[in-house]
Image (cartoon, grey):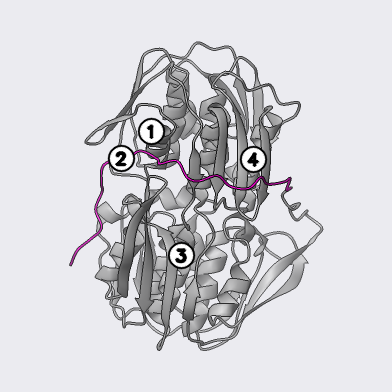
Amino acid sequence: MRLLREMPLPRVKPAGANPESHGHKPQPKATAKSQVMEFKLHPGGVISGEARVPGDKSISHRAVMLGALAVGETRINGFLEGEDALATVAAFRALGVRIEGPEEGELRVHGVGLHGLKAAGNTLDMGNSGTSIRLLTGILAGQAFDSRLSGDASLCRRPMGRIMRPLELMGARIDADAGDTPPLTVHGGQALAGIHYDLPVASAQVKSCVLLAGLYAAGTTTVTEPAPTRDHTERMLQGFGYEVRRDNDVILLRGGGRLRATDIDVPADISSAAFFLVAASIAPGSELLLTHVGMNPTRTGIINILTLMGADITVQDEREIGGEPVADLLVRYAPLRGIEIPEDQVPLAIDEFPALFVAAACAEGRTVLRGAEELRVKESDRIAAMAEGLSTLGVANEVLEDGIIIDGGRLGGGVIRTHLDHRIAMAFAVAALRAEDEITILDCDHVATSFPGFDALARGLGLQISTRAGGEDGEDA
């Protein structure tokens, strides 16, 4: 059985010109007293048809960031108009970068160069986006001005010590209001120096933060990964004309260079496609074609793991667009079996495990996951949150410090708490395909952070899903 493997870093190829876009503002978040969205799902259903899920969130973030730091105009097509990526757009606008759009996924970023950012007048609100705050902190560590970054209640519980430590070793000064959680104050005017940093845990966000700070550092910055993580930052830096070298598990760049504007075509997000890969795999009679899916080899763990479980997934029309591998994925229903998930696949599927936990619940036998401590510091503790929801549906599971054991079997119904985590909501929506009773999922507004229009697309493909206004915002609504 062939697993998808890592490949060398290609250069981004300029795309064609896009028409000019116009202003777009993110929708306001629910407040403590506002009505929030709930998903209501009837059991059963068949998934069929053809779909292209929204653009890749990781690439959308990085395209805006590097476009802002480049010289010239960067045109982005396929940009994800979700709240997380829009938080990045809003932050760079506040830092003095002119950005047109997005409109229908098209965006124009008028870069100001590495040293052209200006101090924001207020605290930069990163919403629920861990990628935004962690990567932007690396960039702001090299500026001449002070900055303050914060976010919503969920983000302000997420640990930032993992980026503060290496940045401080480089000479940055960063303060957290409480321990190592946001809000953060990044003090400008610090002279950064390149370091060699061994990542204690495989994390693309920490790696990217250090590399982006390295753009402003004297000398060479190197990062060693304990396991491969998504390499969009390295690929895109090369596409913007900045030399990045990789020697096995070591990534290296020198400070003091220059980014040149380019055009970016954002592929469909494999993390969003994951929910429908699982949906078609678990619902008898299903057949679904997912088009233009990003197939970066540091992101294909979801396909590898499902294939090991017996899923019927065919990779079609493999091609390269904008420096990223892309393909169409044909998935048909197939009986799944429980497996011990290989630890070398864990970093390649770290954001897809909520969906994979549902696949495990529908598989015959036992699925064991270890080596996934990173899941505990996502938008929620995803191990605990998914275990809670699986238990609600009657699925036997055992929580481990670094993973979970799931015994596949029958799924009932019930009320699921999302813990304000978009991927928890979408995972349990998919579970309804094999449930024996109705499922209600609370607090689903955060789905828009990564997958605006999820419910409409899911309904069009065969999921029996409806939305309604729920109680007041909060995990216990």
Q: Quadrant of the C terminus?
A: bottom right
Callout 3 amino acid: Ala
Alpha carbon distance from label 3 to label 1: 26 Å
Lower position in the chain sequence, tag 1 or tag 4: 4
Q: Is residue 89 visible?
A: yes
The magenta stretch spans which residues?
Answer: 1-24
Alpha carbon distance from label 2 to label 4: 26 Å
Instruction: Tell me, for residue 9, which label it has, or none.
Output: 2
Compared across the picture, whether 53 is left or right of 98 comes to: left
Alpha carbon distance from label 2 to label 3: 23 Å
Vertical relation: 202 (above or below) 256: below
Residue in the picture at 45% in, 41% down: 14
Return the residue nearer the eye: 322 or 2: 322
Return the residue nearer the eye: 448 or 42: 448
What kind of element bears circle 3?
helix
Callout 4 amino acid: Val
Q: Is residue 298 magenta?
A: no
Quarter residue 211 falls in: top left
Residue 74, position in %: x, y? 55, 36
Lower position in the chain sequence, tag 3 or tag 1: 1
Rate crowding at label 2 as few (under 14), some (14 to 19) or many (20 or more) other CA atoms within 10 Å. Answer: some
Residue in the picture at 32% in, 40% down: 10
Q: Going by the picture, which residue comes out furthest to the left?
A: 1
Lower position in the chain sequence, tag 2 or tag 4: 2
Judging by the rendered image, the residue that carries numbered circle 1 is 238
Judging by the rendered image, the residue that carries numbered circle 4 is 89
